[in-house]
Image: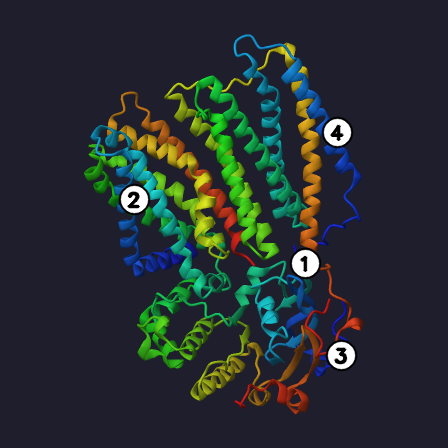
């Protein structure tokens, strides 16, 4: 596994990553402006409902990021290619950030609506559990020095955490249903779909741009930890007495 | 055959370390006491929340049990020694997980009288309670043993294990607390079965998944 | 990857069946390469000494061959079984005496052996295992935990654990004389003799060149992870430069 080549790294970050992120940011700004400012007020909930234009796309993309992380974890365990480990780290970080934003948006919605900062909505609660689970894995990565162990363990933990997500969702849902809590409405009236879609793509592009850039950072770090993939040939052997580093 | 040998080893190790189990029980009982202070002397409220607190106490105690279970394996790298014999990692995992399950169930059952006394939370359905404790402990033990194997080799092991384990066992906590609460307070609508089923599904999924992944976690 | 290009009397035994065959083994720890392009062959039934200074890669080499750690590059075969492709089969055939004792400090010496015996499918009764403890000189401490032992006694117990595996055809010993007293040295000599009689192949990493030269058939020298020399054991002991450097301080 470890003798797979470290992925080649170009001089600067690929332009497409920046372009993607930039395009995403622009779309997000446009969609948010439209949704938050221009779209008509919702009949029953008023202005607070506007947060759905950001909340729903964030939710889709957070789930997408973590699903991608799950895929990277599987790919790494099955193939052993370092690039999957770099992408795993990036996808988890972006996924955790989006999930955290999701929780914050949920709170912002809940306070004016229900008067409390948190409602135990199954989706929101599951998101909170996901934040903790994947932050835990990111913390694990910080505390393990050996790159191979770090990669294998975080892949294993990511798989367990991801498989757990639907179970958490169902258990919170049943637990909640006994108390008949209102859930955060996810539907938006059909006239208002456009800002939603624009934002969804905006966050999607932004997300992949960020994952790409972050994965590159992870790759650079791996390069510095592991050095070049093969030792020098015999001809360049440093005789005894020199320092032990025979790179 | 390897599984029987692994189980023998882990039970023997636990038996040798039984003084630890007493200490962990005291920790759990102390936690129950401290939790009761959070409510105050309101007997009705105490009784209502007893289920939650006993499972929290068991969850906290489980981190001690689980971390300890790999301590002896890592001191002199005995686990590696066994893997080289060769012994299949699966057998080593299930032996350890079963031994941890036994210890956690035992702790849980011992904490019940403490709960009964401090929280006035008695139940006549004692067998049902034991059943829920067994199912819940199994749910704690499976992922816990996997993560304990990982974190025992990393730095900051005491912090990492709860950090990784607690989010994963949320379903166990929810289901066990709910089921226990229904046993204590009464279950007019017969919901305990569905919670027990949730626990069984979680246990089946976790025990198989963790067993598969354990080999990767301990190989070098 | 070609076999090492240095001349070697091992090549003369090309007709004998080969028990251990390494080709281009490389292993790194982070940025540092601990093994670089190590290749050699060990004929069956012979005793190979692995010499070198501290940090030259002896322990890493033995651990790679025992499948305790993976090689990053290169291949090796133990009795024809590839390390990477068939690790379990390799483990069936090897015994490893490592720096780590592989013991459970909370179990007694006898119980430690019993645990291993059960996994090996052997008789784990007290009667069956006490002779083994007697052989390594620990019979009177059979019911004490290794935590109360001295370093040398713990080493003897690990030695007993290695001997449990009677059908190990390749035995890897990492500094077997380390931490032992003179009776312990004689014990190791006896055991090496027994392994020989049994027809086992032995790879032994050691500093004690004089002693090892009497017992070994061949030797290799590792220097900073590379194979610096290989030859017969007598030639190895005669290499004056290495003699002075490799002996522990103050002699044996």
Give the residue at x 29% y 49%: B27
Question: In the rendered image, which residue does mark 3 sit on?
Answer: C6
Question: In the rendered image, which residue does mark 1 sit on?
Answer: A226
Q: Residues within 10 Å of mark 2 (few under 14, many from 20)?
A: some
Tag 1, which secondary structure?
A: helix
What is the chain identity of the residue bearing mark 4? A
Which quarter of the rendering shows the C terminus of chain A? bottom right
Whole-angstrom CA distance, mark 1 to mark 4, is 34 Å
Answer yes or no: are tags 2 and 3 on the same subunit. no
Q: Nearer the viewer, residue B164 or A203?
A: A203
Whole-angstrom CA distance, mark 3 to mark 1, is 29 Å
Tag 4, which secondary structure?
A: helix
Whole-angstrom CA distance, mark 2 to mark 3, is 68 Å
Question: In the rendered image, which residue does mark 2 sit on?
Answer: B31
Whole-angstrom CA distance, mark 1 to mark 2, is 46 Å
Give the residue at x 61% y 47%: A77
Whole-angstrom CA distance, mark 4 to mark 3, is 60 Å
To which quarter of the image does residue C220 belong?
Answer: bottom right
Tag 2, which secondary structure?
A: helix
* Mark whose residue sits in front, 1 or 4: 4
Of the numbered discs in the image, which one, if any, rests on residue A23?
4
Q: Residues within 10 Å of mark 4 (few under 14, many from 20)?
A: some
Q: Are marks 4 and 3 in contact (CB under 8 Å)?
A: no
Give the residue at x 80% y 49%: A11
Q: Nearer the viewer, residue A58 or A41?
A: A41
Q: Is residue A238 left or right of residue C125?
A: right
Which quarter of the rendering shows the N terminus of chain A? bottom right
């Amino acid at each position: 596994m470890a003798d797979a080549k470290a992925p080649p790294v170009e001089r600067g970050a690929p332009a497409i990553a920046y372009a993607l992120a930039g395009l995403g940011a622009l779309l997000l700004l446009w969609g948010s402006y439209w949704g938050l400012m221009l779209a008509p007020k919702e009949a029953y909930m008023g202005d607070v409902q506007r947060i759905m234009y950001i909340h729903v796309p964030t939710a889709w993309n957070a789930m997408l990021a973590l699903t991608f992380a799950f895929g990277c974890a599987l790919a790494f365990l099955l193939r052993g290619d370092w690039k999957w480990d770099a992408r795993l780290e990036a996808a988890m970080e972006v996924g955790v950030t989006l999930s955290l934003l999701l929780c914050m948006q949920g709170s912002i919605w809940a306070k004016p609506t229900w008067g409390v900062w948190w409602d135990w909505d199954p989706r929101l609660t599951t998101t909170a559990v996901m934040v903790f689970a994947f932050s835990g894995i990111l913390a694990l990565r910080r505390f393990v020095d050996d790159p191979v162990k770090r990669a294998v363990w975080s892949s294993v933990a990511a798989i367990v955490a991801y498989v757990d997500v639907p179970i958490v969702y169902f258990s919170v849902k049943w637990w909640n249903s006994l108390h008949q809590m209102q859930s955060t409405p996810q539907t938006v009236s059909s006239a208002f779909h456009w800002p939603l879609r624009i934002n969804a793509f905006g966050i999607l592009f932004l997300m992949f741009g960020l994952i790409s850039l972050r994965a590159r950072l992870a790759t650079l770090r791996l390069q510095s930890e592991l050095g070049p993939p093969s030792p020098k040939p015999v001809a360049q052997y440093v005789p005894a007495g020199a320092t032990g580093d025979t790179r | 055959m390897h599984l029987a040998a692994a189980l023998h080893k882990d039970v023997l190790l636990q038996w040798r370390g039984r003084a630890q189990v007493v200490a962990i029980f005291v920790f759990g009982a102390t936690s129950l006491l401290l939790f009761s202070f959070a409510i105050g002397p309101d007997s009705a409220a105490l009784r209502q929340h007893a289920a939650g607190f006993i499972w929290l106490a068991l969850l906290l105690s489980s981190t001690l049990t689980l971390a300890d279970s790999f301590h002896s394996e890592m001191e002199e790298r005995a686990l590696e020694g066994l893997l080289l014999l060769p012994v299949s990692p699966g057998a080593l995992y299930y032996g350890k997980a079963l031994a941890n399950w036994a210890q956690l169930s035992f702790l849980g059952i011992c904490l019940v009288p403490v709960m009964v006394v401090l929280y006035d939370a008695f139940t006549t359905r004692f067998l049902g309670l034991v059943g829920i404790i067994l199912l819940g402990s199994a749910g704690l033990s499976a992922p816990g043993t996997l993560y304990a194997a990982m974190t025992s080799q990393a730095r900051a092991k005491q912090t990492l294990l709860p950090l990784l384990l607690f989010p994963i066992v949320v379903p166990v906590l929810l289901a066990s607390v709910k089921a226990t609460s229904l046993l204590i307070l009464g279950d007019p609508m017969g919901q305990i079965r569905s919670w027990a089923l949730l626990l069984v599904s979680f246990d089946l999924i976790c025990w198989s998944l963790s067993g598969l992944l354990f080999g990767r976690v301990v190989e070098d | 990857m070609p076999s090492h290009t240095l001349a070697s009397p091992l090549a003369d035994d090309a007709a004998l069946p080969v028990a251990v065959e390494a080709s281009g083994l490389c292993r790194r720890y982070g940025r540092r390469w601990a093994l670089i392009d190590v290749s050699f062959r060990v004929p069956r039934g012979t005793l190979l000494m692995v010499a070198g200074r501290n940090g030259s890669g002896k322990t890493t080499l033995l651990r790679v061959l025992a499948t305790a750690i993976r090689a990053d590059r290169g291949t090796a075969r133990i009795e024809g079984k590839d390390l990477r492709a068939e690790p379990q089969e390799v483990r069936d055939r090897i015994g490893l005496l490592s720096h780590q004792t592989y013991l459970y400090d909370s179990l007694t010496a006898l119980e430690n052996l019993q645990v291993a015996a059960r996994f090996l499918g052997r008789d784990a009764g007290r009667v069956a295992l006490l002779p083994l403890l007697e052989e390594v000189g620990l019979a009177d401490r059979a019911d004490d935990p290794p935590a109360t032992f001295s370093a040398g006694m713990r080493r003897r117990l690990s030695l007993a654990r290695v001997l449990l595996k009677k059908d190990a055809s390749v035995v890897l010993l990492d500094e077997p004389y380390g931490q032992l007293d003179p009776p312990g040295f004689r014990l190791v000599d006896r055991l090496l003799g027994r392994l020989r009689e049994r027809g086992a192949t032995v790879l032994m990493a050691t500093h004690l060149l004089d002693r090892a030269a009497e017992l070994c058939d061949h030797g290799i020298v590792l220097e900073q992870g590379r194979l610096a020399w290989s030859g017969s054991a007598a030639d190895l002991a005669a290499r004056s430069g290495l003699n002075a450097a490799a002996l522990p301080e103050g002699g044996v």
